[in-house]
Image (cartoon, helix red, strand yellow):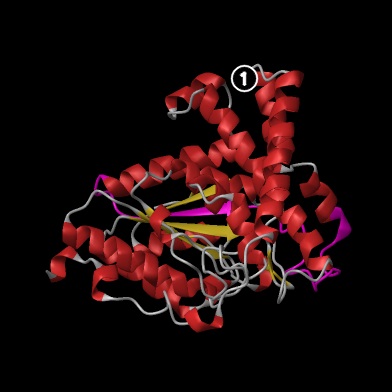
Amino acid sequence: MAVREAEPVGSFNEVREAGLDRDDLLAIYRHLLVTRGIEERGHILYKQGKIPGSFYTGRGNEGAAVGVATAMGPDDVGTPLHRDMGVHVTRGVEPWRIFAQYMGREDGPTRGRDGNVHMADAKLGMIAMVSHLPAMLPVAVGCALAFRIREERRVAVGWFGEGSAARGDAHEAMNLAGVRRLPVVFVCDNNQWAYSTPTHLGYAVEHLADRAAAYGFEGVVVDGTDVLAVYREAKAAIEKAREGGGPTLLELKTLRMEGHAVHDDAFYVPKELFEEWARRDPIERFRTWLFENAELRGEEEDEIAARVKKILNDALTRAEDSPQPDPATLLEGVYATPEDLDTPHHK
């Protein structure tokens, strides 16, 4: 089973065939702008000393995150990581709650009880990450197994980076998913650097998606800066899983346009590589596509940008007003109750 390299999305007709209309395209554009705006303002909050701990961003990965999240169904679940802010935005997490999370406030998704990017809103089908990144893949596979047992038409999406692909839990998750043909999609954010380790020192195959064949399912390589190609391939993989066709491994190729975290200046990345990928910026790329294929007009773009700016400015103000968590409530929401679990197959 050879790996497939996805073609870029061409005309608006191809987009329609993939299930998107013009309003959907503009919503994707807004999500891209909000995602980058959140992280840009996060940098400011960090420099102001308002974000405890370190600070991680996914600049350059916005198209990959938003594209996959747009393809997910409302009842599907996912385990996005620290480069996947666009997943939270697209799934409906309000920006002010994300800022509150950054600052460890009561109104953040984890109510000030976890790391500033260890966030998720379970009501929106998201499961919070842990720092041992591929450890979330077995969680996604477990969700997919539960959907199979319950005979639910739902799909789990599990994210991981190319560096974490070297760990055993990535292998274990894909092996079980392949053997049982579970409704799960594996998304590799291949941003070419596992901290300071380049990809040629991380794996010996040409593409990480080449590994999928060994587990018995399809691997697809996608340009992660092309949000529409990401959407198209993610949509196909998710619906294939929903219909009983088993897993898919999507390798979304980008470049991490900032260091591993705010403390890392990424001196080890060649300047020419940054320059090359800056020309493929996912937001500028999609903006150009909208002007050329979806009749985006200058005044319409200005209106969207102004609306996004207001949303983010209002969000910052509201998040700053969020209280610090009360130490007396430290254990609330940490341990599940039988009612929280709500597992029908146990009743």
Vertical side of 79 occupied by 130: above or below: below
- The quadrant in which residue 215 appears is bottom left
Residue 120 falls inside the magenta stretch: no
**Residue drawn at the location 34% of the way across and 42% of the way down:** 239
Q: Is residue 261 magenta?
A: yes
Report the front residue among 107 and 26: 107
The residue type indicated by label 1 comes to Ala
Give the residues in magenta: 243-272
Residue name at image x 53 percent, y 53 percent? 88
Of 251 and 304, the residue lying toward us: 304
**Which quarter of the rendered picture does the C terminus lie within?**
bottom left
Query: Could you say where residue 99 lies in the image, as x and y percent from the top left?
Result: 65, 59
Residue 275 percent across, percent down from the top left: 85, 49
**Residue receiving disc 1:** 294
Q: Nearer the viewer, residue 57 or 252?
A: 57
- In the depicted structure, whether residue 121 falls above or below residue 261: above
Relative placement, left or right, of 173 versus 254 is left
